[in-house]
Amino acid sequence: AFDQHLNMILGDVEETITTIEIDEETFEQIYRPTKRHIPMLFVRGDGVILISPLAKQS
């Protein structure tokens, strides 16, 4: 659901945060994704930048 300010209530949300660390010996970037499930999430409209439908999966 959303309103005229684009405040949204989202259900069954999966949040993914990717942190990047640098290996001090090899100077390689190490990507570490962290995921969490959120049953219901309120997103304030002024934090919304882009809304896009999910890509079709085959």
Image (spheres, rainbow, N blue to C red):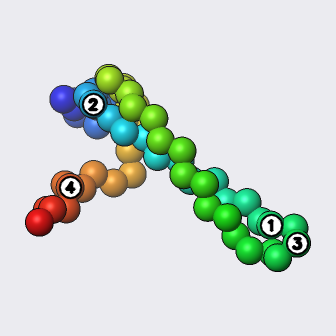
Graded by Cα atoms within 10 Å as few (under 14), some (14 to 19) or many (20 or more), the crowding at tag 4 reads few
Answer with left or right where residue 56 lies relative to residue 8.
Answer: left
Residue 20 percent location from the top left of the image: 67, 60
Labels 2 and 3 touching (C-beta < 8 A): no
* Helix, strand or loop at mark 2: strand
Which label is found at residue 25?
3
* Residue 48: % across, % down: 38, 44
Q: Secondary structure at mark 1?
A: loop
**Amino acid on which disc 2 is placed:** Asp
Q: Which residue is mark 4?
A: 54
In the foreground, 22 or 1: 22
Task: Say which label, 2 or 4, has the lower sequence index.
Answer: 2
Front-most of residues 49 and 32? 32
Crowding at dot 3, Cα within 10 Å, few <14 / some 14-19 / many 20+, comes out as few
Q: Secondary structure at mark 4?
A: loop
Q: Is residue 4 above or below residue 34?
A: above
Q: Earlier in the sequence, mark 2 or mark 3?
A: 2
**Sequence-earlier tag: 4 or 3:** 3
Amino acid on which disc 3 is placed: Glu
The residue tagged 1 is 23
Residue drawn at 70 percent across, 70 percent down:
29
The extreme front residue here reads 25
